[in-house]
Amino acid sequence: MGYALFPLVILMVFAGLIAQAGELAMSTLGAGPVGLAETNADVAADRAVSYADACVRTAIANPGLTGESIVAQLPLGVIAPHGAACKIDAAPDGGRVVYAWAPVVPGAIEKIRAVTDAGETWFVISTAPGVASGIVGGATHTVPAAVPFRSVLYQAEVRP
């Protein structure tokens, strides 16, 4: 009669192995819904920081350049975030103010704060268009109304 239980035992062993394999696959870095969200936040933060850096480098490389939609010269292989923009305004004291923004992705603000060593030049537009809050201190700051709501913004002044 023991041989009649043998197929059931084999079935249970394989069911256990399949369950363990599924748990192992979900425990690897970047797997599952939480891992996917973290990976998306990492990628969005890296792309936003790279885009902001490219916008500033474009402003430095082109003295006197101002405008609403500046084409930032990104490094080879780097893709601009969807919906990102670069704007350069003339400052009253002779320099230029560089604005680079991209749509905010959940979790990206924390990653940007970590990547930029808690830089004071990063803001998020989360209360109203034209008003930005610092991602480090939370202080409010007036920005151009062209920066859309729910965007992460980098602002710097250049003097070439």
Image: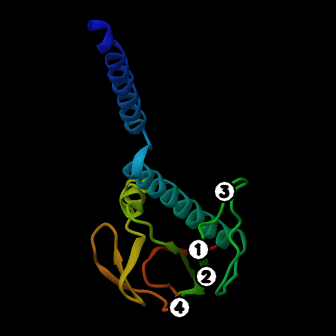
Q: Quadrant of the N terminus?
A: top left
Image spot of residue 57 (x, y percent): 64, 65
Q: Secondary structure at mark 4?
A: loop
Q: Secondary structure at mark 2?
A: strand
| Location of mark 4 (residue) | 92
Instruction: State which mark lies toward you, 2 or 3.
Output: 3
Dot 1, how many residues are within 10 Å of its Cα: few (below 14), some (14-19), or many (20+)?
many
Residue at image location 51% in from the left, 60% down from the top: 44
**Label ID, residue 84:** 1
Residue indicated by mark 3: 78
Q: Which mark is residue 88?
A: 2
Q: Amino acid at mark 4?
A: Pro
Closer to us: 13 or 144: 13
Amino acid carrying label 3: it is Val
| Amino acid carrying mark 1 in the image | Ala
Taking the spot 66% from the left edge, 56% from the top edge, the residue there is 78
